[in-house]
Amino acid sequence: IDQFEGGMPAKLRLDFTNEFDAWHVLCGFNWSDNSVSLQFNLASFGLDDGEYIFREFWTGETGTMRTSASHLFENVAPHGCVLLAVRRLRENAAQYLGSDLHLSQGSELVGWEENNQRLDLKLRLPRMAMGEVFLRLPFEPAAWYVNDLLVSARKASAQVYRVPVEVDGFSNIRIEKQ
């Protein structure tokens, strides 16, 4: 984004798409030797006007942002970064917000099927891993299954859930609707 105009890059934008979604990974860097606060303005990353939902990779923080406003990320570690997966907010639609399994926060998602009774997701990683998947759901889930085992998801905020997953090549997530 800044094309190395000031020496070390201050921000980076990567665009991703798959058959289920399109999203952006935005990164703001702290090259100093002290903790700092980094301000994110989506317009400065060249995103179209609108409302977006984000997930920060390192902290798991989620929230919404408009391109016309800024969001402050405090206490970014020395030589650290803020790494956001940003998707256009879709009202009344289930959305994959990312995971702590892959920096892209979305390329691990290889299956998404939804009907009136349930939502099925499939993850793929070329390794064994344990972590969490973050989902925004406009419905109240009745039950959560990962690889056919009942699990407990945690509500992170309004309509946002953290689902514990284990991946050994593939992982299947099923969310039963009420």
Image (cartoon, rainbow, N blue to C red):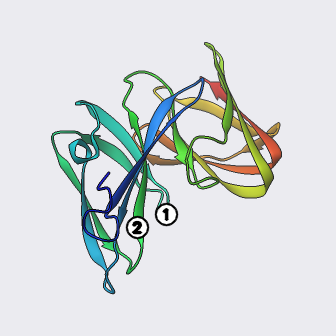
Q: Which mark is residue 81?
A: 2
Q: For residue 11, what is the image quadrant?
A: bottom left
Of badges 2 and 1, the one in the foreground is: 2
Nearest the viewer among 42 and 61 is 42
Q: Is residue 31 above or below residue 162?
A: below
Few, some or many residues within 10 Å of mark 2 (<14, 14–19, 20+)? some
Q: For residue 121, what is the image quadrant?
A: top right
Q: Which mark is residue 149?
A: none
Amino acid type, mark 2: Cys
Q: Is residue 89 above or below residue 61?
A: above
Q: Residue at x 78, y 41 (%)?
A: 171
- Dot 2 or dot 1, earlier in sequence: 1
Q: Secondary structure at mark 1?
A: loop
Q: Quadrant of the C terminus?
A: top right
Q: Position of residue 62 (x, y in %)?
A: 40, 49
Tag 2 and tag 1, C-beta contact below 8 Å: yes
Q: Position of residue 103 (x, y in %)?
A: 56, 54
Q: Position of residue 9 (x, y in %)?
A: 34, 64
Nearest the viewer among 80 and 94 is 80
Residue on which disc 1 sits: 58
Q: In screen coordinates, is 1 left or right of 123? A: left
Q: Residue at x 37, y 23 (%)?
A: 91
